[in-house]
Amino acid sequence: MGQVPISFIRQVMCLCFNPELFQSPDFASDVKEHARRILDSCRGSSVGSYTDSTGLDVVRHDVAEFIRRRDGGIPSNPENIILTAGASEGIKSILKLMNQDQDGKRPGVMVPIPQYPLYSATIAEYGMEQIGYFLDEDKNWALDIADLKRAVTEARRHCNPSVIVVINPGNPTGQVLTEDNIRAVIRFAQEEGLFIMADEVYQDNIYAPGSKFHSFKRVQAEMGAPFNTVELASFYSTSKGFMGECGIRGAYMELINLDAQVMAMLKKMLSAKLCPTTAGQACIDCVVNPPREGEPSYESFQAEKQGVLKSLAERAKIVTDNFNSIPGIHCNVVQGAMYAFPRLDLPQGLIDKAKSLGQEPDFYYALHLLESTGICIVPGSGFGQKPGTYHFRTTILPPADLLKTMMDRFKAFHVSFIQSFQK
């Protein structure tokens, strides 16, 4: 998508993988110090060595300090930090941990609708039960406590609800949850005895005025007893944010309030995978322990980071404004993350035509858009949506000039295609 990698991250990784470059004057002193610190924590001072299955100790301590700073001083224990090869690996490991039948009923996992398909696919793979709860589109995709209660009550007839997944900022919906909404979810989880999985990989990606990221950990801690005893796993990744280092597979998860024996079993289970990639561990360390003010790389790091985030905010507004200018398309403000999830008002003729072909109407629409313009969107039916509604997901990642060109082609297609079913 044209995003230039963050120099500090790539330079540190370059030194970790080619230590001969420590002799080069082309690398700043803080880059060398950071790389040396990582290498000194590796066996044999080499990233080619295995690490502990939970990750390098120095990186886990840096992650814990990052979380402490983020959450206003609330402590984080490095022993509760597990480094993973991407957030997906951590998410799958927690779902696997929770996969235990009780009283002859399968475990149920509450997931938002719309949802990121990693969850539905993993739940199906593990033979668990998916419990869908609908996000409230009219309230910018907030969680509706009444619908959560409906979903969990209905699910108890055939499974044992054990987990609630919350994605904040949202994928595919692009919302940022308010603190009040998070508090309500934590109360619900405590009342229902649910383990919270907080997918917070887009926490750096906040764009809309008035929106702010609130971590589940901080909100839970500040609520006090009994809410601060709810079991919680939160996830963060180098694939998102301002980094965009998807292929390096760096991530962490923090586990709160787990029973000691359960934590020991989780670590034993993870040991079968040997260790997360050292490249990913080095990358996540650069993110959670970036250059500090006064260090040689600080100014350039901040400039690059803020440049990426500012550009994403501009593109989020371009996408929102342009979709809302097209008749028959309604798009909530893209408050965060990297996607928009607009709603389509489709004429009955188009719906009937799609169904006659055995296709979902939004898939039919997306297929014709692709064939006519080369623009690829993902139909909302792939993420789940309220019956009788039609949506699609699109990204805000293309450069602004390309986005504007795309939106012009999109609008021309939409108006013509819809009119062809209204004659």
Image (tube, rainbow, N blue to C red):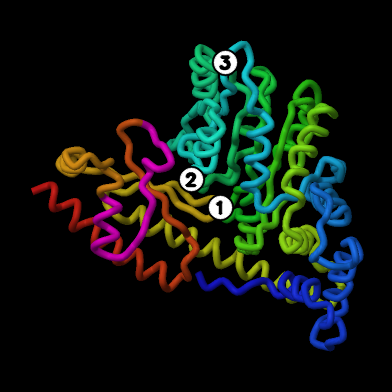
As drawn, 367 above or below 27: above
Residue with the mark numbered 3:
105
Magenta region includes residue 367: yes
Q: Is residue 188 visible?
A: no
As drawn, 191 above or below 83: above
Q: Amino acid at mark 1?
A: Ala
Which of the marked residues, 2 or 3, is nearer the chain's N terminus?
3
Q: Locate residue 37 relative to residue 153 in the image: left or right.
A: right
- Which of the numbered marks, if any, corresponds to residue 18? none
How many angstroms separate mark 1 from mark 2 (CA)? 8 Å
- Residue 229 image point, x, y percent: 79, 25
Q: Amino acid at mark 2?
A: Thr
As drawn, 99 above or below 1: above
Query: Of discs 3 and 1, which sits in the foreground?
Result: 3
The residue carrying pointer 3 sits among few (fewer than 14), some (14 to 19) or many (20 or more) residues within 10 Å by Cα, namely some
Q: Nearer the viewer, residue 183 or 45?
A: 45
The residue lying furthest to the front in this view is 272
Q: Which residues are magenta?
A: 365-386
Give me the residue at 50% from left, 36% from top.
120
Asked whether disc 1 touches disc 2, contact meaning CB atoms under 8 Å apart, the reply is yes
- Which of the numbered marks, if any, corresponds to residue 173? 2
How many angstroms separate mark 2 from mark 3 (CA)? 32 Å
